[in-house]
Image: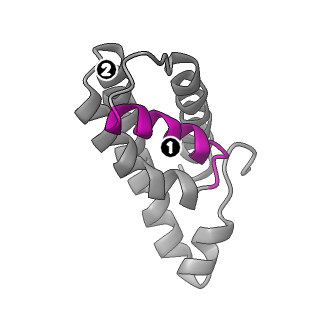
């Protein structure tokens, strides 16, 4: 449990209300993997605006669940925001996507 994510901030926010924690975890599973898929599509197609918007939307959740890739996600976000056409963020994106995939699998197992 909590190998690829942590609930420290969520427990603090929820004041240890388990129903609230469950709701936040389920919301993560409903939204973040889909956002990650859209972010990959945006980066692959060099849709800078979509990459920026999607990464920006994901930041609070990635931070809240302590995935450890917030700085990487910000790098992808800035790539989109600044339209850094001479920069390749594929490796950075892969780090973010892997962290999300591992966390989603673990959260799914922990909150099933």
Is residue 106 visible to us here?
Answer: yes
Q: Which mark is residue 26?
A: none
Query: Which residue is painted at 50% across and 22% down in the image?
Result: 89
Task: Answer few, some or many: residues within 10 Å of disc 2's Cα (few below 14, many 20 plus, some between 14 and 19).
Answer: some
Q: Residue 35 in the image: x percent, y percent?
A: 35, 38
72 magenta-colored? yes
Q: Residue 39 in the image: x percent, y percent?
A: 36, 30
Horizontal relation, residue 6 to residue 14: left or right: right
Q: Secondary structure at mark 1?
A: helix
Label tally: 2
Q: Give whichever of 98, 42 is nearer the camera.
A: 42
Q: Up-down: is 88 above or below 15? A: above
Q: Give whichever of 21, 100 is nearer the camera.
A: 100
Task: Answer few, some or many: residues within 10 Å of disc 1's Cα (few below 14, many 20 plus, some between 14 and 19).
Answer: some
Is residue 30 visible to us here?
Answer: no
Q: Residue 32 in the image: x percent, y percent?
A: 41, 43
Residue position marked by numbered label 1 in the rendering: 74
Query: Which residue is painted at 33% across and 39% down in the image?
Result: 81
83 magenta-colored? no
Distance of label 2 from label 1 (alpha carbons): 17 Å
Q: Up-down: is 23 above or below 112? A: below
Visual colour scheme: one colour
Horizontal relation, residue 7 to residue 108: left or right: right
Of circles 2 and 1, the one toward us is 1
Q: Residue 42 in the image: x percent, y percent?
A: 30, 24
Residue position marked by numbered label 2 in the rendering: 41
The segment highlighted magenta reads 66-82
The reply to whether the C-beta atoms of the residues labelled 2 and 1 are less than 8 Å apart is no
Q: Give whichever of 85, 40 is nearer the camera.
A: 85
Q: Secondary structure at mark 2?
A: helix
Query: Which residue is painted at 24% across and 34% down in the image?
Result: 49
| Dominant secondary structure, magenta | helix
């Amino acid at each position: 449990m909590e190998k690829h994510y942590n609930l420290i901030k969520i427990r603090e926010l929820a004041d240890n209300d388990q129903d609230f924690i469950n709701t936040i975890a389920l919301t993560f599973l409903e939204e973040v993997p889909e956002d990650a898929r859209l972010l990959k599509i945006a980066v692959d197609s060099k849709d800078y605006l979509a990459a920026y918007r999607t990464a920006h939307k994901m930041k609070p959740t990635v931070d809240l669940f302590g995935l450890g890739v917030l700085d990487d996600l910000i790098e992808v976000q800035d790539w989109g925001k600044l339209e850094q056409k001479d920069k390749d963020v594929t490796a950075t994106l892969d780090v973010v996507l892997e962290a999300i995939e591992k966390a989603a699998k673990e959260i799914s197992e922990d909150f099933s």
